Image (tube, rainbow, N blue to C red):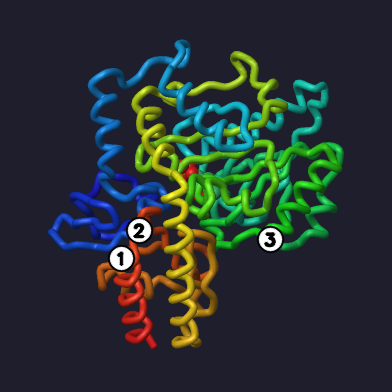
Amino acid sequence: MSALAKNYKRNKLSFKKGKGSYLISTHGEKYLDFVQGIAVNSLGHSNSKLNKAIQEQSKKLWHVSNAFKIPEGEKLAKKLVKRTFANAIIFQNSGAEATETAIKVARRYFFSIGEPKKNRVICIKNSFHGRTIAAIHASGSKKMTEGFGPKLPGFDHFEFGDHKKLKSLINNKTAAIMIETVMGEGGIKVIPNWCIKEIRKLCDKRNILLILDEVQCGIGRSGKFFAFEYAKVQPDIVPIAKGIGGGFPIGAVLMTKKVSKAMTPGTHGSTFGGNPLAMAVGNAVVDQINNKLLNNVNKMSKYFINKLNLLKLKYPKIIKEVRGLGLLIGIQLFYDQTRFIKKLMDNKLLTIRAAENVVRILPPLNVNKKEIDEALKIINKVCKQIK
Ligand SMILES: *Cc1c(COP(=O)(O)O)cnc(C)c1O
């Protein structure tokens, strides 16, 4: 009997070690891991530079309070500012904390300019921003909020694609629109560039802040450092997490100079956020998200998606759509994907579900063609078996 609460539906499978794209189970079996902790291990398992960074830092200093200056964090923040729209960063420990902090920053900004009533946030219905109280109410998902009332006020929702509704929700109390640039849990739904551009324009026109949640699609996963770069827009606030730590829990909120002015001393804090150990790892991750790696993401993505589309033609009754951006890929089936994912696992390929019958595929960003071919072979085999 497990002493853990039953809040997860866990597989029986467990692992003892990993290297790159592969995991070794506790029974010694080798699996191709195209989940990578849900887009967390951006550089695969046991990356040598990350191992070195954590070992060296662990011998020097793990943790000090944010009451003191933390050079490793200053360094990582500078790197993120240099590569992005952002001017200031707050470090956190997870995605939900980062999205909540993004909401806090937006509200505090309007408070600081004398508009405290401008505090509502518009989100996409059934989006995903994490599992804390504010984050579940931001998602507007019945499944996630049920039993966790009272309903938290301050959020308005529109269905993905319902632009009329989005416009109708905007009023003088709207502080921000918060969307995932690519909806991950929601079924790998890529928000089109023109749409992000229009939302940016709408925000400018109505004096609203644009929060783009890049917790899953950010830090190189899309083939660019941030997925919103494809739309050539500048957001105001961007929560990140997952990929930035390469497996170490790190979250962060990136923001413009304008909104950062509202975050004066005492307005926000975190005991663990941005500690030296986490920051040493974060620095070692970001240093490896270079053009060469991004080129690999784009090349492998194109190859993988093309081949998956060929499988879609071969199995038109199983695969409905192949979609995604970079190495955030979804195979949408015509029916519930549970059995399909189980069969892939039986054949030593790990994938994970997303909404709308999607089999989500998240290889490490340094995946190679041979590994993708291996995955394609398994997917083809399972399509053949399940037909
Ligand atoms: C995973 C995720 C979160 C929540 O991150 P946690 O670290 O699990 O709290 C928030 N937003 C998006 C888009 C995510 O994919």
The residue at 69%/21% (across/down) is 261
Asked if the residue under mark 2 is in contact with the one under mark 1, i.e. CB atoms within 8 Å, the reply is yes
Question: As rendered, which of 34 and 295 lies closer to the eye?
Answer: 295
Q: In the rendered view of the protein, which quadrant contains the C terminus? A: bottom left
- Under circle 2, the secondary element is loop
Q: In this rendering, is residue 60 above or below 85?
A: above
Question: Can residue 147 be seen in this snapshot?
Answer: no
Q: Position of residue 324 (x, y in %)?
A: 53, 64
- Under circle 3, the secondary element is loop
Residue that sits furthest to the top in the current view: 68
Hey, what amino acid is under mark 1?
Glu
**Mark sitting earlier along the chain (2/3):** 3
Q: Which residue does the numbered mark 1 point to in the structure image? A: 371
Hey, what amino acid is under mark 2?
Val
- Under circle 1, the secondary element is helix
Q: Is residue 91 left or right of residue 120?
A: left
Q: In this rendering, is residue 280 above or below 365?
A: above
Question: As rendered, which of 32 and 132 lies closer to the eye?
Answer: 32
The residue at 79%/43% (across/down) is 203
Query: How many angstroms separate mark 2 from mark 3 (CA)?
Result: 31 Å
Disc assigned to residue 160: 3
Disc assigned to residue 367: 2
The residue at 59%/45% (across/down) is 213
Residue that sits furthest to the left in the current view: 28
How many residues crowd mark 3 within 10 Å: few (<14), some (14–19), many (20+)? Answer: some
Query: How many angstroms separate mark 1 from mark 2 (CA)?
Result: 7 Å
